[in-house]
Structure formats: C-alpha cells, structure tokens
C-alpha cells in the first residue's frame, strides 16, 4: 500500500510541475494590429488576406489555455463572441524558441513564444505568414 501511495504522489506532483511550467496558461488575444502591420510590409501578400485583416473579418480571436484544453473564442467585427470551441491539447516540448503542441492527439504545430506574446505560422492559398497573439491574463 505504501508503494502505491508513493507512486500516486509522484504522478500528482509531476502533473503539478508540468502545469506550472506551461507558459501558455491563460488568455491570449489576437494582435491583429501587429499581424496587419507585418502583412502590409510584405510585397507578396495576397490581397484577400490583407483585406480580411483590414476589414476586421480576420484577427478577431482569442485563445484561452487551461491545463488540458484550449478554448478558441471567435468574435465578430464588433467584438461580440460568436463561437467558443474547446479542444484538448498537450505540450510535446518546450524549447528555447518554440513550444510544440498537439491538438486532439493529431494536429501538431509550433507556437513561437516571445515574452508575453506569441505567433503561429499560418498558410492560406500558398502564402505563409505569422499571426500574433498577446497575453491578456494568466490562469493560476
């Protein structure tokens, strides 16, 4: 019985350490202004992508990371929530320049963290670009 108690405590403590070391915990708002500025400085950005961010059809999302789930919150042009989708995620690795995450045990991608901001690399119609998010709150 003592061995099972020790194993349970180790598993519990390991989970706590893992959660405390998760730099994604909290609410991250889309930084549409920064994304748009970088897109405007690109010579090859498709007009459809630029129009989407300029007209506020794109860049109106937030991501809320808990220890097990990420909530993708979509807003309309006026900032009203139109969708809140919850998906399980796991941290695969935390490196000095990026965090590798897997959604739903199948979709893997990198998040490039820079202090209280991160970006993800997106692709649309063959054009690759960065979409930026800024930290709003931290979940403790």
Image (spheres, rainbow, N blue to C red):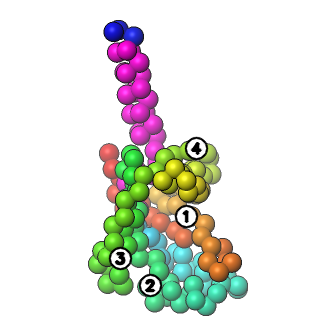
Q: Which residue is mark 1?
A: 119
Q: Secondary structure at mark 1?
A: strand
Image location of residue 82, percent across then percent down = 31, 76
Judge the density around disc 2: few (<14), some (14-19), many (≥20) Cα neighbours within 10 Å. few
Mark 4 element type:
strand
User: Which residue appears farthest toward the top when viewing the image?
Assistant: 2
Give the numbered dot on residue 93: 4
Q: Earlier in the sequence, mark 1 or mark 4?
A: 4
Q: Secondary structure at mark 2?
A: loop
In magenta segment, residue 18:
yes
Crowd around label 4: few <14 · some 14–19 · many ≥20 (10 Å): few
Residue beneath label 2, please?
A: 57
Residue 71 vs residue 37, the one in the foreground: 71
Residue 122 colored in magenta in the image: no
Residue 58, percent from left and from top: 47, 80
**Which residue appears at 47% of the width and 66% of the height?**
133
Q: Which residues are magenta?
A: 4-28
Which residue is at a point 46% across and 44% down the rendered structure image?
A: 22
- Overall secondary structure of the magenta stretch? helix
Which of the two discs, 2 and 3, labels the residue nearer the N terminus?
A: 2
- Tag 3 residue: 75
Mark 2 / mark 1, whichever is N-terminal: 2
């Amino acid at each position: 019985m003592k061995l099972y108690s020790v194993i349970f405590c180790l598993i519990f403590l390991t989970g706590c350490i893992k959660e405390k070391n998760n730099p994604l915990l909290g609410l991250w708002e889309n930084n549409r202004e920064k994304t748009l500025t970088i897109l405007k400085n690109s010579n090859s950005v498709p007009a459809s992508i630029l129009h989407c961010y300029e007209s506020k059809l794109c860049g109106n999302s937030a991501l809320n990371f808990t220890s097990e789930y990420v909530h993708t919150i979509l807003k309309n042009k006026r900032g009203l929530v139109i969708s809140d989708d919850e998906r399980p995620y796991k941290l695969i690795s935390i490196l000095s320049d990026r965090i590798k995450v897997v959604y739903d045990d199948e979709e893997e991608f990198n998040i490039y963290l820079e202090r209280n901001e991160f970006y993800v690399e997106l692709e649309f119609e063959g054009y690759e670009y960065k979409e930026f998010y800024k930290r709003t709150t931290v979940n403790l």
